Image (tube, helix red, strand yellow):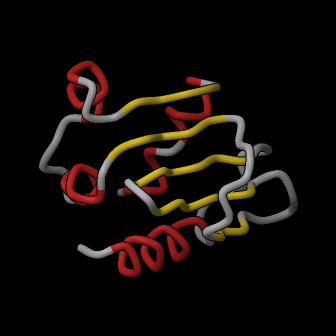
Amino acid sequence: MNFETILSAVTAQAANVAPFGAKLKFVLGEDVILIDGSGDSNVVSTEDADAACSIITDTDTFTKLKNGELNPMMVVMSGKVKIKGDMGLAMKLQSLIQ
């Protein structure tokens, strides 16, 4: 799955979930997906802005998580996914990658 496909999937999923009340960011190598859930709806962009929570990984790991091929807890513990910021918000991100 390439970045554009991931961005499209996250954008579609973000439209189907309630706003989180904060900015959340996926950092996939050189690419960024920012979800601004601080308003009335989730707004997805590729802007590299400050966020309350950042999920840092690579495209391959993200794709495997999205496809259910990897256990989210195991990839965090193994260091394949790094979480910076609010862990409570990180838990809510699962609804965006399913």
Percent position of residue 98, x then y: 35, 57
Examine the image and state in which quarter residue 39 appears. Answer: bottom right
* Residue found at x 62% / y 26%: 85
Percent position of residue 60, x then y: 21, 57
Q: So how many labels did they put on this image?
A: 0
The answer to whether residue 39 is left or right of residue 67 is right
Seen from the viewer's position, the closer of residues 34 and 11 is: 34
**Vertical position of residue 38 compared to residue 87: above or below:** below
Percent position of residue 72, x then y: 28, 34
Seen from the viewer's position, the closer of residues 55 and 66 is: 55
The quadrant in which the N terminus is found is bottom left
**Vertical position of residue 27 compared to residue 1: above or below:** above
**Vertical position of residue 43 compared to residue 30: above or below:** below
**Vertical position of residue 14 compared to residue 77: above or below:** below
Residue at far left of view: 69
Examine the image and state in which quarter residue 82 appears. Answer: top left
Percent position of residue 91, x then y: 50, 33
* Residue found at x 66% / y 57%: 48
